[in-house]
Amino acid sequence: MKHLGKLALLAAAIGAAAAALMVFGARLGLWQPITGFGLYRSYFDLLAIGVTAVGLIALIVHLFRKEKVPAAFGGIAALIGVAMLVPMISSTLNPPVRAAPINDITTDTANPPVFLVLDETREGARTSLAYAGAKVADIQVTAYPDIAPLETNLDADSAFVRALEVAEAMGWDIVAKDAEHRRFEATARTSVFYFADDVVVVVSEQESGSRVDLRSVSRIGRSDQGINAARIRAFQQKF
C-alpha cells in the first residue's frame, strides 16, 4: 500500500501518454487520422475516468495513513485525470451545435472551382471531389450565408501570388499550382487528429481588381463540423 501513490502517478503518466497518442498519433505517422479519432471516441473518456479514480483512491488511502508524500503523488495523478476529463465535462455543460451535414464548402456554389490534379485516389479519401450540386448548395447557403467570393483591388496576378503566400503561411501543402491560369490545389490538415482536407483556389480578373474563389472538401465524414467554412473565413481574413 505504501507505493500506491507512486503507482497512481505512473498510471496517470501512462494514461496521459496514451491520450496524447490518440490525438497526435496521425501527425506522428502512426496511423490514419480516422484511427486516432476512433480510439479517442471509444477510449478517451474511460481512460480519463480511470486515471482520476486511481489518483483519488491513492490520495484518500495515503491521507488516511498520514503519508504526505505518497498522498501528494495520488493528488497529482488525480489532477491529471481531472484535466483529461475537461473535454467530456465541457461537452456535457455546453453541448456542441450540430453542424450542417455537408463536407464540401465553396465561395461559388453556382460554378464551384474544380479539382484538376487531386482526384479520387488521394490517400485515405472516402468522399468524392465531384460537387453534389443544388442540394449541397442550398444547405451551405442556409448554414453558412457569409461564405462568398473574395473581391480584391489587386490585379489578378498579384492576387494569385498573395493567395499562395497566405496558403503557405496557413501551413497548407501546395500540391499543384498553375500561374498561367491563376489556380492552385493544396491539402490542409486539421490541428486535432490531423485530418486531411483538400482545397482549390482560383483567381479571376475583374473589371476593377480581381476575385478569389475557394473550395474546401473533407476526405472523410458526411459532416465537416464547420471546419471547411472556418478555413475559408481564416484564409480570407489573412488575405
Image: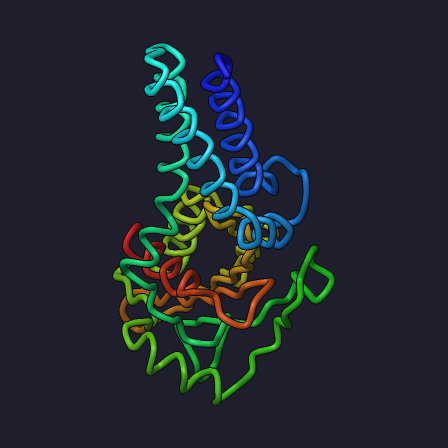
Q: Residue at x 64, y 72 (%)?
A: 128
Look at 41% across and 83% down and name the residue there: 139
Of the pair 185 and 5, the residue shown nearer to us? 5
Image point (74%, 62%), residue name:
121
Outermost residue toward the front? 65
Q: Residue at x 51, y 51 (%)?
A: 188
Horizontal side of residue 6 vs 73, given as left or right: right
How many numbered marks are there? 0
What is the image's colouring? rainbow
Q: Quadrant of residue 30?
A: top right
**As drawn, which residue projects farthest toward the right?**
121
Residue 197: horizontal and vertical position, in percent? 54, 58
Q: Where 160 falls versus 169 (above or below)? A: below
Which quadrant holds residue 115?
A: bottom right
- Along the horizontal axis of the image, is 99 left or right of 135? left
Percent x, y of residue 152: 28, 62
Q: Nearer the viewer, residue 154 or 87?
A: 87
235, 25: nearer the viewer: 25
Give the image location of residue 126, x and y in percent. Answer: 66, 66
- Residue 39 x %, y %: 60, 49
State which quadrant residue 114 falls in. Answer: bottom right
